[in-house]
Image: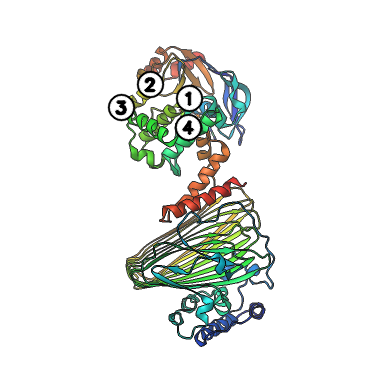
Amino acid sequence: MLNIKNLQVGLEEENKQILKGVDLEIGEGEVHAIMGPNGSGKSTTSYVLAGKDGYEVTEGSATLNGQELLDMEPDERAAAGLFLAFQYPVEIPGVGNMTFLRTAVNAQRKARGEEELSAGEFLKVVREKAKTLKIDADMLKRPVNVGFSGGEKKRNEILQMAMLEPKMCVLDETDSGLDVDAMKLVAEGVNALRDGKRSFLVITHYQRLLDHIKPDVVHIMANGRIVKTGGPELALEVENNGYADILAEVG
Amino acid sequence: MVAQPKLDQGAALLAAYAQPSGAAWMNDARAKARASFAAMGAPHKRDEYWKYTDPSALTAIPTADADLFSTDAPIMFDEIDRVKITFVDGVFDADQSDDLALAGCSIETLADVAATDIHWAKELFGTLEAAGQDPVERPLAALNTALATQGLVIRVTGTCPKPLAIRYVHASETSDALVRHLIKVEKGASLTVLESGAGAARFNSVLEVDVADKGAFHHVRSQGRDHERKTVTHMFARLGTESLFNSFTLTVNGVLTRNEVVLELLGDDTQATVAGACAGDGASFHHDDTVFITHDAVNCESRQVFKKVLRNGATGVFQGKILVQPDAQKTDGYQISQGLLLDDDSNFLAKPELEIYADDVACSHGSTVGAIDEDALFYLGSRGVPHKQAQDMLTLAFLGEALDEIADEALRGEIETRLGAWMERR
Ligand SMILES: Nc1ncnc2c1ncn2[C@@H]1O[C@H](COP(=O)(O)OP(=O)(O)OP(=O)(O)O)[C@@H](O)[C@H]1O
Ligand SMILES: [Mg+2]
């Protein structure tokens, strides 16, 4: 599904390398988690995959089902099946959440040569999915993320993911800012999308999310690299002992 | 002392047009305005009030030619049930107009009224313009009073069931038009006026509106798209107790536009809104909204909402003032002006002003200028929305706050369609 090879990334504006050779391979239907200290490059990895400006890729590649993502515009990456749930979802004053969702869904359908959804069809699907995420009608009407609480923003990300039905979902700290119940909701939302084909990359600091979304593989990122890869037990180790031991071990 | 070049240019302007003659009262009104203009002289870019906008294209003799703009876009407001009135190069065209008949009001042409010896308009014509010359001079409005022969004189006595739609057709590349309307909204009456079109190569229009107690005046205007047209408009309104005034203007294209709005809130509990959305393209585009709102009564609300999207070196200007007189307690004055620059070459200049002499008031003003939000663009892109479409969405969203001031949904829809077409054209 997703294949990242020796990804090296710096900032466009200043001479600073952030990713120093990231290798990561996620197979179809797999769930991988990335943990790692603050500032280790997790969000940068997700942004570079999604195509955010301001980063310069100096080396390496990232392919989605064989297609090079790094050559594409952000919208093309989305149409190819990539989705990023943002660590900090963006507020867009003046654009209604519903309009935003419908524009996104239809833009992707158009890019794939599919028929656009009618307003009626769209409304039906969105209401149903919003309901399972406990997103009320008012939140759908309001401008995108404007005045949403931290938890509401994260649920809104999952709603977008559910509507867009991507192949490869990258979730950047979707659990941060969520209360216990909201975390369950979000995890259920994610799990509902697990169909054996769709793949997930879950960036998190906490084991508790991984209790709900069970990963197949856990990676530890430090200083711009994946320094250790293991099974779910790796997350428990981090939870119990922090990163010191692991970092010491890998030097 | 008025600078000599201003006086000279003023004299040249007066000499360039024929002095119209009509009934005695009209001749008086015109003579007064003529004298007032002659004393003020023509506006000059060194005038404080014209600091951001060079008026020379508005005062030059003769005016520069302006190419006609041809489009297959539908006529503005064509979907709306209305009384249609057409002016071609500033001249009333009966053949292209409906009968001047609408329930709840009487509609006459200025040409007819000016020739009538006894007319209610005598008490009003030119008086709002004259009052609006203080504390800031507006010479081009006085010029209009002195010289305009074309326009409408409307008296509203009831609730007009449909809008009056005035269309200004620009048909000659050299036309230089002065159009003057006078509207008197009587107690409890209401009228909606729609205006559209470029009007002329150079178009000077003045609208005087007197709204009596509990009266309502709604106004939606779409200024013509002819790229080379030059326009100066003045709207003077006097508002009575519990009256309602709502005006919205859309401007796309044109080389120079100056829209002045002067409102006097004279009765208590009045609500007034002036809003504008402007989309400008190219270094020759210059658009100026200049608003002066005087609160002279208790518990009134005024709103100014102006948004401009500018690209390829276009310039937008906003000068907005709220003056709250000592007795105007409980005034609620709101003013926002924002520029969205789609590139580094474009400019937005704003001069928001508050002058408050009452102590129990809530006035706020804000002015911002900025580029399109890159994070929002990326967010939309990451959801699959292509760059251009995302940019258009954010641009419309930016203008949305001004469009939201239009109460009527169908009219707002028309304006949105027009803006959408502007975005398509790049
Ligand atoms: N646009 C930027 N300008 C300057 N520094 C940046 C920028 N983007 C990322 N960095 C730096 O790159 C490093 C990696 O940041 P990144 O956001 O990827 O970390 P992270 O692993 O997601 O951290 P966290 O767990 O705190 O979310 C940090 O030192 C950060 O300050
Ligand atoms: Mg991060």
- Same chain letter for marks 1 and 2: yes
Secondary structure under badge 3? helix
Disc 4 chain ID:
A
Instruction: Give the mark nearest the N terminus, 1 or 3.
Output: 1
Q: Which residue is mark 4?
A: A105
Which quadrant, please, contains the N terminus of chain B? bottom right
The residue carrying pointer 2 sits among few (fewer than 14), some (14 to 19) or many (20 or more) residues within 10 Å by Cα, namely: few
The residue carrying pointer 3 sits among few (fewer than 14), some (14 to 19) or many (20 or more) residues within 10 Å by Cα, namely: few
- Residue A180 image label: 3
Q: Which of the two residues, B40 or B202, is positioned nearer the viewer here?
A: B202
Q: Is mark 4 within 8 Å of ligand 2?
A: no
Instruction: Give the mark nearest the N terminus, 1 or 2.
Output: 1
Distance, label 1 to label 2, CA atoms, is 13 Å
Q: In the displayed structure, would residue A62 be above or below residue A156?
A: above
- Estimate the x, y position of residue B10 in percent, counting from the top left: 63, 78
The answer to whether marks 2 and 3 mark residues whose Cβ atoms lie closer than 8 Å is: no
The answer to whether marks 4 and 3 mark residues whose Cβ atoms lie closer than 8 Å is: no
Secondary structure under badge 1? loop
Q: Which residue is mark 1?
A: A166
Amino acid under disc 1: Pro
Distance, label 2 to label 3, CA atoms, is 18 Å
Instruction: Give the mark nearest the N terminus, 4 or 3.
Output: 4
Q: Which of the two residues, B45 or B12, is positioned nearer the viewer here?
A: B12
Disc 3 chain ID:
A
